[in-house]
Structure formats: structure tokens, C-alpha cells
Amino acid sequence: MMLLALLALGQFTPIPGKKPLVTAPRLATPTPSPQDTTAMPPEPAAWRPILLWRTTVKRGEGTAAIGKEGVFVAGGTAVHRFNSEGRTDWATEIGTSLAEVTLDAKRVYVGSERGTVYALDRQSGAVAWKATLGNAVRMAPVVVGDRLIMECLDNYVYALELATGTVKWKFVRPDGSLGYAGPSLGPPGSVLVCGESTVYRLNAATGQEIWRSNVGGKALGTPALSGGRVYVAGDGAGVVALDAETGERRWRFRVGDEKTGPDWFGSPLVVGKTLYVSSYRRNVYALDATTGKLKWSTKVLGSALARPALDEKRELLYLSSITYRDNPTLTALSTRTGTQVWDYKLGSLLAAPALLGGRLYLASTNGYFYAFSIQ
């Protein structure tokens, strides 16, 4: 969930006994960006993704979760499970939700604006349990062992017993919380959470603090763990790499000047030796994950704060962005050079793309949930 996602609430009115119609949208034709083949290495072969289907999801702002039986997404006031053809398998009402969903082997976990956390059966959508916390839950929870850990807008981090929803511990962040960064897995047995300007590593079983590290600015993106380091980004903080065992800072990458101020960065994606991150000022950066050195940067057509998705087969990076001057909002970039390969206009995209098995799924605030083939 990104910074601007907190500005709007969606509404959803289900139609009892009916499944949503699957209709083909009228989309802008993807147009490849000009490429300077004399200055750049050869790009991946030209191609276009195929729209498989779109179906109604009122005010989709959360990233989808993909399972073998279907794809799960929260939208409006319900959690939906769609099959491979875009038909609704089930939809469970949970009240207004701006949250992202999390899966384990049996259940779907999601929070609501009322502060209620739901555990739903993956096969039927039935409510296994629910627990009410102190305020809205907007970010995806994370499963660590027998704990479900989530951040809440009452400034606490909660750990619930996975089987029953019983609160096992809660941790208050001394520096407060902006509510834009979700928890993520830390080194074995631990979880990473963000305060307003601090990253905390907590023992997942007990909630005991292992270390804390001030990142020197606001933490707006969910931390990423890779190769023994924790990466976090934000407003003023730039992109920061921390030692995962000690919290010690290894490097920082920042852009901006006294006139414009720092750029706002979203959630980073780290794959191998490269870190990808996008920004509110419509910039996308590829950094060396070891040193923080810039590999390339490019500009897209809208503010992009959601975590990118990587298509390793085609060496493409998919980015979603909010509407800016009626420009396209889904963009594919070459991972080698940052050159734009294609784009689509799908309405404002606050959710990150979800990619699995040759398909890309994306919820839009225009009221639709999309599935593309990228075979």
C-alpha cells in the first residue's frame, strides 16, 4: 500500500447469486518507446502481452496473492478468489478494506479499515477466525512460524496465533509509524518492521527487539531482505542497506537537491546483485545491491511507489503507477538498460503487479482486476 492509497476509500456492492461478467476492455494499444540501438545493447525481442480477461473489483488497491487454485485480491468490501478464466469462485464480505492479502497453505489473511483481521479458508472463503485490533490494518501481514504478524495504524505491531487469532504479543514503535510500510521476513525466526524513521528487527515468537536502526528519513517502503542485508527506502532516507544481523548501515543512495528536496522512494525489489526501486517523481533506478552504485535510471509516465515485479525470462521489469496527465500506468522496462519496451493505460494503479506462471495480475482503482498472458 502506498502513500496516496490512504487518500481514497472504495465501495463494493455485491449482487447476490450472480457472478461478474467477464468482458474485454478497450485498451490503448501498447507502443514501444524509441530505442537507440547504437548506444545500447540489444533489447529483448519485441512482443506484446495478451489481455486474457478483466473482471469487476471495486476500488482495487491491494496487490493480489496467487495460489494454485486461483488468485486472491481484496477490493471494496470483499475478498475475492478468481479462477484462471476470471470467474468468481467465492467472495467474502469483510467491510471496507484497502489491504493486501497473505496466503499460507490453508488460509487467506487480510485486514480491514475497521481494524478487524480475517482468516479465510482458501477453498471456500469461510471465516475461520477474526480478531479486532486497535485501528485499521492496511498492509499485508506476514507469516513467521506459528505467528501472523501485522502493522496497525494504532502504532502497534501485533502477533496473532496463526491457528486461533489470539494476540500473543504487541510491540509499540517509539518513533511512531507512518503506516505505509508492511512487515517482512527477517533472518530466521525474526520479522522486520518500520517506524516513522526506524527499522526494527523483532523476535517473531516473543516480540523482543533484536536491533533498531534509524534510516535518517521517513520509511515509506516495506523492507526487503536479501544476501544478509536489509534494504529499506523512503522520503529523505533515500535507499538504505543495513546489515541483517546487526542493523549497521552499509550504504545509502539519495537523489535530490536543496531546491527540489529528496525524492520519495517506494518498496525496493532485490534480485541477485541488483536492487530496483521507483519513486514519486516518476523515476526508476537500478542499483548495485552490494555497493549502492547506480546502474541505470529512467523516467516513467506516473508516480510509482509500489514494488516492481521482475520477469526474469524476458529480462523485463513491470511497474504500476498512478494516473498522471492521463498517461499509461503499466510499464515494462528492460532490466539491462531501463529502456521502455511497452506500456498500457489501465487507470490509477496503487497495487504492485503480481507475476506467476506466465501471467501478470493487477488491480486498478478504475474498478477492474486484470489478467495478462506474458508467455
Image: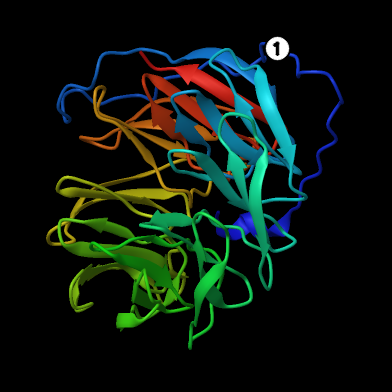
Q: Which residue is mark 1?
A: 23
Q: Is residue 325 left or right of residue 208?
A: right
What count of labels does the image hold? 1
Where residue 34 sits: x, y (%)? 35, 24
Q: Is residue 100 above or below residue 159?
A: above
Give the SS element for disc 1. loop
Answer whether residue 318 is visible to the viewer in this image: yes
Foreground residue, 38 or 116?
116
Q: Is residue 344 above or below residue 207?
A: above
Residue farthest along the bottom direction in this orientation: 174
Q: Residue at x 53, y 15 (%)?
A: 84
Where residue 134 sits: x, y (%)? 68, 73
Foreground residue, 26 or 133?
133
Q: Is residue 195 above or below residue 64?
A: below
Q: Is residue 144 above or below residue 331?
A: below
Where residue 8 sits: x, y (%)? 74, 53
Residue farthest along the front direction in this orientation: 164
Foreground residue, 327 or 6?
6
Q: Residue at x 67, y 14 (%)?
A: 26
Q: Residue at x 40, y 30 (%)?
A: 355
Where residue 291 sits: x, y (%)? 13, 62
The quadrant in which the N terminus is found is: bottom right
The amino acid beneath tag 1 is Thr
Answer whether residue 328 is visible to the viewer in this image: no
Please rate how many residues cluster around mark 1, counting C-alpha atoms within 10 Å: few if below 14, some from 14 to 19, many from 20. few
The quadrant in which the C terminus is found is: top left
